[in-house]
Image (cartoon, rainbow, N blue to C red):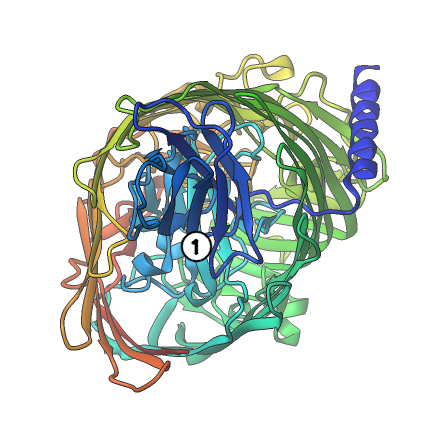
Amino acid sequence: MRSTVTRATLVSLLMVLLLDFHGSAHAQLVTGDLQISVVDSLGDPVPGVNAVVTGPSVQGVRGGVTNDLGLCTVLALSPGKVSVRLSHTAYHPAVFENVLIQLGKTTSLGKIRLVQWTVDLPELVISGEQLNIDPRTTTYGSNLRPSEFENLPIDRDYKSMISVLPQSNVSYYGDGVNIGGGTGLENKYFVDGVDVTQSLVGNTGTNLPYNFIKEIEVRTGGYEAEYRSSLGGIINVVTYSGSNEVHGSAFGFYTSNRFAAERRVGLLDPTQGGFSEYDIGISMGGPIVRDALWYYVAYNPTFTHHDVDVPSFGVYVDKNTTNAFAGKLSWRASDRLQLVVTTTGDPGRRTAVGDGVGIPPSVLKNPDPYFMDQMSGGINLSIIGTYSYNDALLFETTLSRVTRKESTRPSTERGSNDVLFNDTETNTWSGGVEWRANSFLSVNSLDVSTTLFAGSHRLKAGLAYKDMALDQTADNHYLSRTNDTSYFEWHYNQEGVGVHNRIPSVFVQDSWQVFRDLNIHFGVRLDEQFLIGSNGMVDQQITGPIQPRVGFAFLPDGDGSQKLFGSFGRYIQELGTLFALLNYTDIGYYYGVSYDHDPRVNPSGGHIDQNGKYRIEPAIDGLRAQYYDDFSLGYERFVTKELRVSVQGVYRTLREAIEDMWVPEELRYKSGNPGRGDFSAYPRPQRDYTAMTVTVERRDDDQFNFIASYVLSRIYGNYGGLFDAVTHYSGANVTAAFNDLNSASEHATGLLPNDRTHVFKLSGSYRFPHGLAAGISFIAQSGTPLSEYADLANGFNNIKFLSPRGSIGRTPPIWDLNARVIYVLPLPGLLHARLLLDIFHIASQRDPVDVSQARGFMVSNGTLYPYATYGQAYRYQPPMSVRLGMEASF
């Protein structure tokens, strides 16, 4: 009954808000706010001051009036620089120019003292950057704008930028960037307010070049109840918009092995030989109707070629083409209603050679297992906007659709028809392609919220509905040989499976300006998850937990030059559709059979380890969502007008996980919460992240900017996260952590794979005279912990730690230095062009960054068959390489 009431309540509230909304659109995560505090010469608040906001990114005029506390907040401003004019009949007017509105933050001008009309003074104009400490938020993370990242040596995709920020580290295990102790599968990616995270396992988001990006925001934690959450970080970007002036750009980049040093090849590096990559792009934006309708369009194709050494058969070319694009219409329909229609995407095709091979074979009897045709990427559409009913009431909503197609199929007839045979004793391969799949993913979302100013309170409430859908056909078939008396065959097949995860959400929060210099926010959020199986029914419901979010921000001196802040929050991770695919479909079959002889000669006499038809599992009673609790306390201040220092402590502890566990009586896996219900014999999941961060930054200067940070951290527990860095497996919620009861209880707790005790980062840029500029990024960090384990014969991907986790030492500490050199061409008029030289991994040590930790293969009687690859490097640091580029704009 409780679930029925909850769903009915959510639907009813959603309909009420929609009917009252008049068709407006929601601008969550795509704007920033401006807070104005006005006092007189005695420091008393001045009510009734008119504030008018204008700027290149503002359509028309925005503004408001100060209240009895002398405060005025202007919501939902597009990121960028604005001018603010303050006027009152009893005071001289004041104008603030170059006020920076930041994505997802509140910009404050500090206390503004107006001068009374006692003498005839001209209008006071204050130009230049202001002290910019957000007086409200307790969010920890950071923002990057083009003035900061365009001079840094970053990769082409915007996601590479975040690695220069504190608590964001590149993972060498293959899961992208780790944030705040999480794995790469635990991040959420937003583009123009739309969640574009891949919805199957969350291993990527829409790829766009940094040339399209107006601002990027990374939320690591401490954020309010209005925001969806994740176990990692929130990466939010906003693309450029049009303006009242026509502007455009063109760019091109090229790199190849001719500009790279020789690299060391690890066990997981099938690609060898030459490579080349180039991309070109254009963008254009401007007015269709001045101050009313703006447009922006951009297109960027990328072409990548890699020469791959196919063992015994020579070199073949891996070709990949990606077409990134963005388009936006910004419409000021009236003084109160603004709408933004956006589309972005990154569809691509690849003729793949050796993708997903893992450790390459020593002998390949036929090349077909290496050849695949692939499609990836997708298209995103959204309508976003705001409706201001009056100065005290604002409505927001987002309506979006995200689609993504991912397919892998063999390129040859033999690759399609033959079973892959892997002789692990001699590392010899033959036959066809092991894996083929065709997946169509879609996410439809609707978010509605209302903001109400009531005295010193800013109340906000909202509803959301999200439908994540998957339609998939997949087949996985291989035969392996360990020795003359040990063979294993695995086959999994599903065709035309359709599943969903439907997530209604509701939140309410209050931001209370207790005093002029003290703000407290508190709120709650509830996300329910309804897993829809292939039968079209709700086969599993996950309610809650309720997510409280509280925090405070205190400005000790009142002028906005320093802030003390703290927060507590509970954050959940939504399940990807892979979980419903594995547990709630009756389409498909699987089997795993062990033989003491070669089944190709005699297919009879095998021992069935796993066998069955996929079925819709019974609902798991009391299944809890995976979530963590987060505590933070920090202090930041401007030492000078340009230099800001911050210190912060964070403690994040995992409270719940969802995983699959091996049930020997049924010869199959079942899912649940480790340590609860049917799996109470298993240990509870543990992942504790403790960190202290010190950051020094100089930003928003035309000549010299830098960000320096040091993070001292520890990640300890028995659960690495949704990506299994031990086995390098990307199956969210189906890792090896709890596959076997005995191995999960012995030696499984310790330092986790992405623990890095010390991480120091420095990135910055400097503009020299005569059109020269340079930027660098430098990272020095501890190595990651090493363990030793054995692969087990019972089940798929089962392992057993042979000694306490993380106790066998660490990979070598590494440092990485990159540089960008820029020359601005001396061109007349409004045309600007610059030549770029990027040098990556300068003087790279090419040390191991990922090492094989599997001692061998252990059979049921405890006999260990050792692997010759134990202790060898899976991957090394990349070698030095160079990229050439040119960018032009007007």
Whether residue 319 is visible, yes or no, is no
Choose between 279 and 559: the one closer to the eye.
Answer: 559
Residue in the image at 66% along x and 49% along y: 385
The image shows a total of numbered marks equal to 1
Expressed as whole percent of the image width and height from the top left, the position of residue 245 reads 50, 72
Would you identify the image quadrant in which residue 854 lies?
top left
Expressed as whole percent of the image width and height from the top left, the position of residue 41 reads 30, 28
Q: Residues within 10 Å of mark 1 (few under 14, many from 20)?
A: many
Q: Horizontal placement of 132 versus 454: left or right? A: left
**Vertical side of 409 occupied by 458: above or below:** above
Q: Horizontal placement of 281 versus 420: left or right? A: left
Residue in the image at 38% along x and 69% along y: 271
**Vertical side of 807 occupied by 255: above or below:** below
**Amino acid at pointer 1:** Gly
Q: Horizontal placement of 35 versus 148: left or right? A: right
Choose between 751 and 830: the one closer to the eye.
Answer: 830
Identify the secondary structure beneath mark 1.
strand
Expressed as whole percent of the image width and height from the top left, the position of residue 341 reads 67, 59
Residue in the image at 58% along x and 27% along y: 658
Choose between 826 and 581: the one closer to the eye.
Answer: 826
- Disc 1 designates what residue? 80
Expressed as whole percent of the image width and height from the top left, the position of residue 87 reads 45, 42
Choose between 731 and 461: the one closer to the eye.
Answer: 461
Q: Quadrant of the N terminus?
A: top right
Residue in the image at 51% along x and 69% along y: 370
Whether residue 3 is visible, yes or no, is yes
Q: Quadrant of the C terminus?
A: bottom left
Would you identify the image quadrant in which residue 134 lies?
top left
